[in-house]
Image (cartoon, helix red, strand yellow):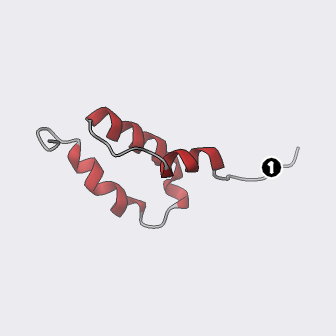
Amino acid sequence: MISEGVAADVEKIESMLQWPKSNSLESIKGFLGLTGYYQMFTKDYGKVRQPLTSLLKKDNFK
């Protein structure tokens, strides 16, 4: 069996690109969960994720 290595799933990338504007903590958590695996493919993912993660702190999401 020959391994092709790690690759991004095109359908999941399309889901990320089409993700609706978040209006709830659950939606933000869902988006971060979906994108978490793909951090290895995204330059400076931590910089992109940080503002969204900060919204998850108590009383930060309005």
Residue 34 higher or lower than 39, as above or below: above
Locate residue 46, reporting x and y percent: 37, 59
Q: 53 or 10, which lies in front?
A: 10
**In the image, farthest residue toward the left:** 59
In-image side of 8 versus 32 (left or right): right
**In the image, farthest residue toward the top:** 26
Locate residue 59, reporting x and y percent: 11, 39
Location of residue 24 by image quarter: top left
In this figure, which residue is indicated by the disc labeled 1? 3
- At x 88%, y 43%, the residue is 1
Q: 46 or 26, which lies in front?
A: 26
Helix, strand or loop at label 1? It is loop
- At x 23%, y 41%, the residue is 56
**In the image, farthest residue toward the right:** 1
Locate residue 17, reporting x and y percent: 49, 52
Amino acid type of the residue that numbered disc 1 sits on in the rendered structure: Ser
- At x 29%, y 56%, the residue is 50
Residue 9 appears in the figure: no
Location of residue 47 by image quarter: bottom left
Residue 16 higher or lower than 46, as above or below: above
Residue 31 appears in the figure: yes
In-image side of 46 versus 55 (left or right): right
Q: Dot 1, crowdedness within 10 Å: few (<14), some or many (≥20)? A: few
Residue 6 higher or lower than 27, as above or below: below
Q: 19 or 43, which lies in front?
A: 19
Q: 48 or 5, which lies in front?
A: 48
- At x 73%, y 53%, the residue is 5
| Tally of numbered tags | 1
For the C terminus, the image quarter is top left
In-image side of 1 versus 5 (left or right): right
